[in-house]
Image (cartoon, grey):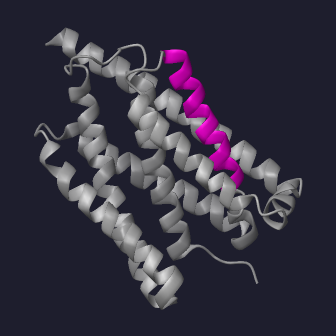
Amino acid sequence: MENEVNVQNKIFGKTFFWMFLGLLGSAIIAWYTYSSGLFVDIILGGYFNTLLILELVAVLVFSFLFRKLPPVAVGILYFVYAMLNGVTLSTIFVVFELSSIIYLFIISAFVFVALGFLGYRTNQDLSSWRPYITVFLIAGILLSVINVFILKSPGFDLVIDWLILALFCGVTIYDINKIKLLQEEPNIDQEKIHIYCAMNLYLDFINIFLRILSIFGKRRN
């Protein structure tokens, strides 16, 4: 029992360290892209959508080839995604005031920690949540696409923000809970399991932050 707890603590420690590095890298790249004016060239040059596609490709490759890739390749892929995401995140500095971004980032961190604590302290296996999470995630994406291209309703966009925020709050609890069970799963390389977990938590935090920013953020005039 004590050995199992030590293994869990080791995985959690490495996971949060890698998550922190990914977030730090994204923040640095985002600020540099904005402050240097590089984001203007990216948007005017039509590269923004290309970056979004590259991000999606990186996530898909990470998800489907995680078990086959060596630890070094998994780590590189994680940071490539974090850096690409940093470039696209630079646009938040254009839309929102800096003080609002910093304040809501801190709020998001507190929310994430609280959710993580719930997931960690929950002894029940939450694997049964997976089908519901998948369904609601697909529904959220479809509703977002419909609103962007058809409805174009700011009010409906706010509803979607709240729904996706609630979804990722649940996903965070689920992912933290899942980390406790992963060391027991066969055929997972223990040298890279923390990178897989870090990627999941990184995505959870970013989505929570962006939704909170979208709902409560103070926009520039």
- In the rendered image, the vertical position of residue 164 relative to residue 112, given as above or below: below
Question: Residue 93, position in %: x, y?
Answer: 73, 64
Q: In the displayed orientation, state which residue is furthest to the top.
A: 3
**Does residue 74 show up magenta in the picture?**
yes
Q: Is residue 122 left or right of 193 when viewed as pictured?
A: left
The spot of residue 36 in percent (x, y) is 89, 53
> Vertical placement of 177 versus 36: above or below?
above
Task: Choose between 117 and 139: the one closer to the eye.
Answer: 139
The quadrant of the image that shows the N terminus is top left
Instruction: Name the residue at 41% across, 37% down.
Output: 63
115 versus 196 height, above or below: below
Q: Does any portion of residue 21 appear in the rendered image?
A: no
Q: Image quadrant of residue 167? A: bottom left
Is 76 part of what is drawn in magenta? yes
Q: Quadrant for residue 161, please give it.
A: bottom left
* Percent position of residue 54, x then y: 61, 47
Residue at image location 41% in from the left, 27% down from the top: 66
State the residue at coordinates (23%, 18%).
5
Q: Is residue 90 left or right of residue 41?
A: left
Question: Where does the magenta region start and end?
Answer: 71-89
Prevailing secondary structure class for the magenta stretch in the rendered image: helix
| Whole-percent x, y for residue 4 in the image | 20, 14
